[in-house]
């Protein structure tokens, strides 16, 4: 039967509530798209880490077998796609629905060309732009050029090859003598370097010289922000501008490393919010010209001295901020942003008023206050975890000690600012190493002050959750020490 054209949000919601096509989110954890299964029938998570100890009804975690140490999310995805138990489970679900010719669709946080090949062998359609295109637009150098074509300004910068300190001085001469240098790829501050003298350059000289071109930016006094969007055949849908927590040593060992977000109505001036929506819409429309469609995220830098916005980075995918965007009040009133991504790839004709939706989603009255903290292991030691706080709702009474309240996998089960939803990532039996993600805390209200420093409540949550971990030191001959020291990666 031919699907009629979907007209408006009620048609779109009903379409997904009746969805018969298996859709699989394949990733290390289900964090990024947690809750989408309650909007989309037959949506399932295939994960490496069981954050909920088998208690999440729509998550499949195959038995861990012997494998080489992972160096990236993409390697985890490819392991999961090729796992015998995954293949059998996907095929059995397809047989029950008489879908052996086309067993379903796959979406990811990260994937590569090998992932596409494996999905093709399994008969799974990838509902994202091709990995090659994603890689091209994800390049920080290319992002500047796309922004220029879209009329979205970046911080004053120069794109150049830098093979020596003198090269950097020459290239950055017009930008002053205090620079931020970025290489084409990298996340969580790993490849963002703050350089004002030769000694600071020397610390990162090999990484910079290895690139054919780097981005050299004037260093400005700024604050990070993030905004998620989805470009569709009807136009680009834009979520609200969120603050970012960046570089807090209590949360991350990486200077400039992302470690959380806040969403609240008074985070930015009206001028900044309007700039963000306009720039994101323009960037999304340009992405479609580049051949990209679907979900993406932009990092913006708010110039505190000039009250203006600059383009920072593009993430052509869902991100660690997607949990905030897809669970906000406006998303529950209309539909999560990720539903529009799925709609774009569904092949169904649809129409809705993008301008009206964007106006509604940018209205401060439709934004409630939430914060999330991404807690990493910040010391440079490595140990074996023997105790870890389980996922669910935790309570932090004023002046009291952190206590486990109850199990839940809904973040909206958090009723007050004294409660928080903890998604455990690093659990019993895992290793803690520098930069390893321990888990994510999501709670109501703000966790930063008006000066964008961590609140006492935030510090109490961090200390309380860390205090629930206990590890045992590794033996001197444990081969994991060398592997983990050389191969840590970000799983969000």
Image: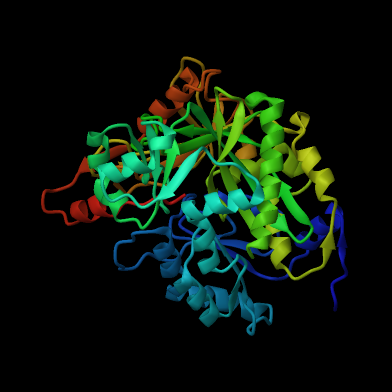
Q: Residue at x 47, y 72 (%)?
A: 113
Q: Which quadrant would the N terminus be assigned to in this image?
A: bottom right
Residue 439 visible here: yes
Q: Residue at x 80, y 56 (%)?
A: 13
As drawn, which residue projects farthest toward the top?
Answer: 399
Of residue 289 and residue 296, the one placed in the foreground of this image is 289
On the image, the x and y values in percent for residue 48 come to 43, 60
On the image, the x and y values in percent for residue 150 come to 65, 50
Relative to residue 263, is residue 14 drawn left or right? Answer: right
Residue 372 visible here: no
On the image, the x and y values in percent for residue 275 come to 68, 35
Q: So how many labels did they put on this image?
A: 0
How did the renderer colour the structure?
rainbow
Quadrant of residue 261 in the image?
top right
As drawn, which residue projects farthest toward the bottom?
Answer: 101
Relative to residue 334, is residue 457 drawn left or right? Answer: left
Of residue 211 and residue 360, the one placed in the foreground of this image is 211
Relative to residue 343, is residue 188 drawn left or right? Answer: left
Of residue 486 and residue 415, the one placed in the foreground of this image is 486
On the image, the x and y values in percent for residue 104 come to 63, 73
Position above or below: 383 against 107: above
Q: Residue at x 34, y 47 (%)?
A: 428
As drawn, which residue projects farthest toward the left?
Answer: 476
Position above or below: 205 against 57: above
Relative to residue 342, is residue 409 drawn left or right? Answer: left
């Amino acid at each position: 039967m031919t699907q009629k054209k979907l007209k408006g949000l009620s048609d779109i919601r009903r379409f997904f509530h009746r969805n018969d096509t298996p859709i699989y989110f394949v990733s290390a954890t289900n964090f990024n798209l947690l809750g989408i299964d309650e909007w989309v029938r037959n949506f399932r998570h295939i994960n490496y880490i069981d954050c909920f100890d088998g208690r999440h009804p729509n998550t499949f975690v195959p038995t861990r077998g012997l494998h080489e140490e992972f160096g990236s999310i993409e390697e985890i995805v490819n392991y999961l796609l090729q796992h015998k138990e995954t293949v059998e489970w996907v095929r059995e679900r397809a047989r029950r629905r008489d879908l052996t010719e086309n067993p379903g669709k796959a979406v990811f946080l990260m994937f590569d060309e090998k992932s596409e090949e494996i999905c093709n062998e399994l008969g799974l359609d990838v509902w994202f732009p091709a990995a090659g295109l994603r890689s091209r637009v994800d390049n920080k150098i290319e992002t500047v050029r796309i922004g220029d074509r879209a009329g979205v300004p970046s911080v004053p910068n120069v794109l150049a090859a830098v093979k020596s300190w003198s090269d950097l001085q020459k290239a950055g001469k017009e930008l002053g003598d205090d620079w931020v240098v970025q290489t084409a790829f990298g996340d969580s501050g790993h490849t963002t370097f703050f350089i004002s003298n030769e000694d600071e350059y020397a610390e990162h000289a090999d990484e910079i010289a290895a690139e054919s071109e780097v981005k050299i930016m004037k260093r400005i006094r700024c604050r990070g922000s993030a905004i998620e969007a989805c470009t569709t055949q009807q136009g680009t849908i834009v979520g609200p501008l969120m603050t970012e927590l960046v570089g807090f040593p209590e949360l991350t060992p990486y200077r400039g490393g992302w470690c959380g977000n806040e969403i609240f109505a008074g985070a930015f001036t009206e001028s900044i919010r309007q700039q963000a929506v306009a720039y994101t819409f323009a960037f999304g429309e340009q992405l479609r010209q580049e051949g990209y469609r679907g979900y993406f995220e932009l990092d913006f830098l708010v110039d505190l001295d000039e009250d203006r916005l600059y383009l920072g980075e593009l993430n052509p995918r869902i991100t660690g901020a997607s949990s905030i965007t897809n669970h906000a009040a406006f998303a529950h009133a209309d539909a999560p942003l990720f539903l529009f991504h799925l709609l774009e790839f569904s092949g169904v004709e649809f129409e809705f008023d993008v301008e009206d939706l964007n106006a509604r989603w940018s209205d401060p009255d439709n934004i409630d206050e939430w914060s999330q903290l991404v807690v990493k292991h910040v010391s440079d030691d490595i140990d074996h975890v023997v105790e870890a706080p389980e996922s669910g709702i935790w309570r932090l009474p004023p002046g009291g000690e952190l206590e486990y309240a109850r199990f839940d996998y809904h973040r909206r089960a958090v009723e007050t600012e004294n409660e928080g939803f903890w998604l455990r990532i690093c659990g019993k039996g895992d290793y803690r190493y520098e930069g390893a993600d321990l888990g994510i805390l999501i709670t109501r209200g703000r966790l930063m002050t008006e000066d964008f420093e961590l609140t006492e409540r935030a510090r109490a949550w961090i200390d309380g959750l860390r205090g629930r971990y206990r590890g045992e030191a590794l033996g001197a001959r444990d081969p994991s020490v060398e592997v983990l020291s050389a191969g840590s990666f970000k799983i969000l």
